[in-house]
Every structure is written in C-alpha cells, then in structure tokens.
Amino acid sequence: MDFELSDEQIAFQDAARAFASEQMAPHAADWDENNVFPVETLRQAAALGFAGIYCGEAHGGAGLGRLDAAVIFEELAGGCPSTAAYISIHNMASWMIDRFGNDDQRAKWLPALTSMQSMAAYCLTEPGAGSDAAALRTRAKRDGDDYVLNGAKAFISGGSTSDVYVCMVRTGDDGPKGISCLVVEDGTPGLSFGQQEKKLGWHSQPTAAVNFEDCRVPVANRVGEEGDGFKIAMAGLDGGRINIGACSIGGARAALEASREHMLVREQFGQKLAEFQALQFKLADMATELEAARLMVRQAAAKLDAGAPDATTYCAMAKRFATDTGFTVCNEALQLHGGYGYLRDYPVERILRDLRVHQILEGTNEIMRVIIARRLLSGNAPL
C-alpha cells in the first residue's frame, strides 16, 4: 500500500496547479459575476491533455487513469470549481465514445473533443427522471437507417453550446434494458434548447434543457448496441463521481487556504484569529476532514483503475463523503471570515455556491447511500 504519488503524477499535478493558479483563479470571479463561458481557457487546458484524460492516445487522449484524473481535477478546482466540473463532464462524455464506441465513431469525434475544438455534453436527466434515471422517457424510434427522437433532457451542462450530445434514450421497453446511447450532433433538425438556467453557482458553464422534436439521428451514431445505454451511463458516472469528489476537495482546499491566510492577518480582541485555540481546532478539523476525503477519492479511483468488483460502491462512498465534506469545509471557511466571507470581494462565497450542487449531481448523495446500502445488505460486501 503506497500513498505517495509517482513522479509522473507529481509532474501533471504541478502542471494542473500552475494552470489553475495562472489561467483560472485570476478570472474565476469575473466568469462567475458575468456568466462567462471561458472557451479559450478550456482549449488551453485541452492543450495540456486535460480534455481527454482517460481517453486513448490514438485520437488525442492522454491515456491516463482515474487516479491520475482525480489528482488533476483537485488542482483545477482549486482555481475554479465550476470550470473544472465542466471539464470533468466533457471528459466523461468523450470517454463514453472512446470506451464503448467503434473505430469510425472514435475517429469522427474524438480528435476534436480531446482538443476541445468541439465540446461534449452528457444527457441523462429528464424533467421526470432525475434520481430514477431508468425511468427516462425520451423515445428513439427506429426508422430505416435513422432513429427519430422525441423528448427532453434537463439541467444539461453545455446545453446549447456543445457540438456533441451523448444522450441516453429509450429504444425498447420500460426499465434499464430498454435504454440506448445515441450521439446527437449540434445542428441536427429537431434539436433545440431551453433558455439558460439561472443558477446559484456554476456560472462559468451554460446549463439548459435539450429538446428533441422528430429529431432524426443516424443509426451509425448509436454507441454500443441497443439496450447498452444504461450500462454505459452508469459506467460513466462511476468516474464522474470520483471527479466531482476531487473537484469538491480542490475547491474546499482553496477555501481552507483562504481561511488560514485570513486568520494570520485578522485581529480581534487584541490578537490575531490564529491565536484563538477554538479557531485553531476548527482549522485543524477542516484539514483533517479534507485529507480523509482525499484518501477515499483516491482509493475509489484506484479500485476503478484496477477493475475491482466493488469499485462502484467505493465510488459512491467517496462521492458522498467528499462532496459533503467539501461543502461543510467551505461553510466553516465562510464562518471563519465572518462578514467578509459573505462578500463577493472574497472567493469563499463563490466556492461555496459552486460546491453546493456537487451533493446533487452525478447521483444525489441520497442515491449514493442507496447504492452503498444495497451492496451491504446483499451479503457481497465485508462490513
């Protein structure tokens, strides 16, 4: 059991941290305030290999593993959690094509996706199918060499700005086995979008409904076989949960660092905040909880890399713990800042707003508990 990063991992950790501090952190407040989608910055990240982290090298991916990705996303989120999370979603959608697509599909879409000349969106959630993803109703009816899509997807990151929409649609009966995966390209007749959602956080990435009205998509755009869609979606979410947990850790770490600096300069009652033992204990607990979350995320990533049979359970555990911990640490950081923490002049309130949704997306933390409990009660997991 080795808890140290390899020399290669330290190298891309350093590269990601430098990029986040130089290209993301200085602009994050402006992106948040003005709802800026930083396309050029995203393409700069892609030039470092961050747009296809675990896609194969044949079509421009970095060919790295899930532990490597967790290290990278923690660092990127230290600069801007919202933008880092968008890159995570793009990676997830691209990986689905790389892992489950055929050679023609990889050659067609991945070179532009791994360079972020094209953007990818992942479309699973619907207005009536959130946590109950297997109940999705968007229908794809076979018509010769095409599918005709009708339905809608909700809360889609990159909705209206993406070039490729990796969509889970119903081609068969009710339930998970009736779901297939289709890639819908921007500009396809019948594809439209709702207005941009007005969100608490995640202002640097667009979010909108994706609508299909007699939207005709070639059968050649189907990823995998009919009925494989739910399996593909869940496989993607295992990695997505690790990534979003890492993003929570990175954002919370930035809030912790801001709190430490504030405590070293802010004075009350004739002494610096750092000299009050009660606040020292609070800071110590914040750091300890973050380190525990980091270890859980990295263990889950290692299990996913190894193809361990209990990887899904550990991904759910890590996502639940890391995202809850990240938000709690940010909330404590805001409290340590006092009234200043509530002001937009300081980064803590923005980080808190960005991290809140991590407890909801990629499967709510309540669903994570369902996944964990099912395995525990099945008798297949040691207690």
Image (cartoon, rainbow, N blue to C red):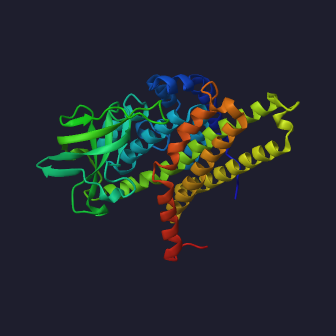
Q: Quadrant of the rendered structure where residue 199 is?
A: top left
| Percent x, y of residue 240 | 48, 48
| Percent x, y of residue 231 | 36, 58
Q: Quadrant of the N terminus?
A: bottom right
User: Residue 284, relative to residue 200: is it above or below?
Assistant: below
User: Residue 26, relative to residue 367: is it above or below?
Assistant: above
Work out whether residue 35 or residue 382 is closer to the camera in this orientation and state it. Answer: 35
> Left or right of 62: which side holds 224?
left
Q: Farthest bottom residue?
A: 379
**Could you tell me if residue 16 is visible in this image?**
no
| Percent x, y of residue 54 | 48, 44
Work out whether residue 15 or residue 87 is closer to the camera in this orientation and state it. Answer: 87
Counting every numbered tag in the picture gives 0
> Left or right of 367: which side holds 17?
right
Q: Farthest front residue?
A: 269
Q: Residue at x 61, y 56 (%)?
A: 299
Q: Farthest right residue?
A: 270
> Left or right of 44: which side holds 340?
right
Q: Quadrant of the rendered structure where residue 193 is?
A: top left
**Could you tell me if residue 73 is visible in this image?**
yes
Q: Residue at x 33, y 59 (%)?
A: 134
Q: Residue at x 23, y 31 (%)?
A: 187
| Percent x, y of residue 321 | 60, 54
Q: Residue at x 26, y 44 (%)?
A: 152
Q: Quadrant of the C terminus?
A: bottom right
